[in-house]
Amino acid sequence: MALDDAAVLDPAAVRRWCRLAAEALGRTRAEIDALNVFPVPDGDTGTNLHLTVVAAADALDEPPGGADPWRTLAQGALLGARGNSGVILSQVFRGLADVLGPMEAPPDGASLAAALDHASVLARGAVEHPVEGTILSVLAEAAAACAAAPGTGLPEAARAAAAGARQAL
């Protein structure tokens, strides 16, 4: 299940999405490590992102009773963050949690767009000297594409965000 296939982002879908994201990053981390050129070519961005998402997924596997899955996801990512990229990603998850966590109703396309926009602001704020052409640019484009998506359905908005991210990348 990809996020763009989800009609509802309930706690079970959040857990599945996070575990699938961890698996996908595990498969592609070497490729991402090889792309890493800013601020120094340390070659571990993919590995750090993977380990951070694994920590978030692990936190979701055993959430505290009645816990908000978005808040659990963000907390797990922060506690398990590896490297600068992991810290930035934890801020992305915090932004999603801030907007989607308190919602009484399942998120729709507009709330996903608002969450991605907020996540983009928090992630950019976590970097002392933000530079274009990084994960920050990709996230900003994903948020903009999601906000510009026609209709308000969650699958359509998620597909638009993914297309915006791919274009930016």
Image: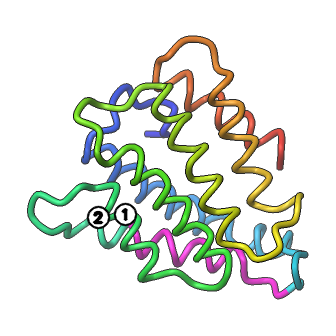
- Taking the magenta stretch, the answer to whether it contains residue 50 is yes
Quadrant location of the N terminus in the rendered image: top left
Q: Residue at x 78, y 68 (%)?
A: 31
Q: Is residue 112 above or below residue 73?
A: above
Stretch in magenta? 42-56
Q: Residue at x 69, y 40 (%)?
A: 142
Asked if disc 1 and disc 2 are in contact, CB closer than 8 Å, the reply is: yes
Residue 51 spot, x, y in % from top left: 53, 78
Q: Please, what is the three-letter code of the amino acid marked with disc 2?
A: Leu
Q: Residue at x 45, y 82 (%)?
A: 80
Q: Which mark is residue 60?
A: 2
Q: Nearer the viewer, mark 1 or mark 2?
A: 1
Answer left or right for 139 relative to 39: left
Residue 103 spot, x, y in % from top left: 29, 38
Q: Is residue 105 above or below residue 49?
A: above
Residue 89 spot, x, y in % from top left: 58, 66
Q: Nearer the viewer, residue 61 or 138?
A: 138
Answer left or right for 152 relative to 70: right
First in sequence: mark 1 vs mark 2: 2
- The 10 Å Cα crowd at callout 1, few under 14, some 14 to 19, many 20 or more, is many
Look at mark 1 in the image and give the residue it sits on.
73
- The image's colouring method is rainbow
Q: Nearer the viewer, residue 112 or 125?
A: 125
Q: Give the Cα separation between the discs numbered 1 and 2.
A: 6 Å
Kindly indicate the quadrant of the structure image that contains residue 164: top right
